[in-house]
Image (spheres, grey):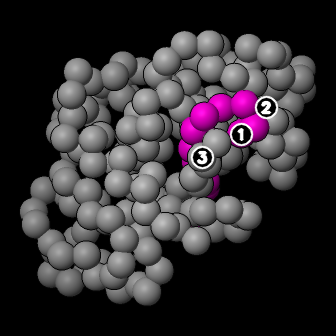
Amino acid sequence: MATLAITCRSGGVLGIVTPLALAAAAGTALVVDLDADGPRYPGDSSLAELVRQGPRLADLRPTRDGIAVLRNGGITAAAAHEVVVALVAGWPCTVLRMPPDEEEISGPIVPVVPLLPGGMTPVSDRPAAYQQMGWHEDAPGPGVTLPTPSRRAVGALLEGRMPLWSRWIAAWTRVWEAPWV
């Protein structure tokens, strides 16, 4: 079972859609939003509800191929720890969406960094997923450089649909394969 935590300090659309793209690249995966102030992803349940009511067997493993998204619902990662551990144990791949300013987690964490023009992207020795933003920039540190996402792919993911094919989503498979420790 593969689990990656993902954080995007710049937040915004990039912080909302990149966990979905990472999950889509895995094929069958669960996105768990650990940000109590996170977006209201579509779906019937939330992490807070699972903590209150306890997870059902159907929550603890995939019932179909594709991605499932568990929005946060206003609970802290610490309060949801036991449920998150149970979810991770049952899914083939899990993406943990971290709050933008949070990097404390036991396990691999993938910082998503937008590549800005003019040398404005911070230099780091830590591996990152560097996201092209419409112009070609070299990554200022180690990690994976991802192509610019298409509007079609971003729109489909935000609407809860899988695009038929996306070069951007396909590139996220390299993130699953990279060493993040």
Q: Amino acid at mark 1?
A: Val
Instruction: Give the residue at the far left of this rendering.
Output: 135
Of the 4 image quadrants, the one containing the N terminus is top right
Viewer-nearest of labels 2 and 1? 1
Q: Amino acid at mark 2?
A: Ala
Q: Which residues are magenta?
A: 88-102
Seen at 26% across and 24% down, the residue is 163
**111 relative to 4 in the view: left or right:** left
> Disc 1 to disc 3, how far (Cα)?
8 Å
Mark 1 in CB contact with mark 3 (< 8 angstroms): no
Circle 3 sits on which residue?
Answer: 2
Asked if 79 appears above or below 174 in the picture, the reply is: above
Label 1: state its secondary structure.
Answer: helix
Which quarter of the picture shows residue 88? Answer: top right
Circle 2 sits on which residue?
Answer: 48
Circle 1 sits on which residue?
Answer: 88
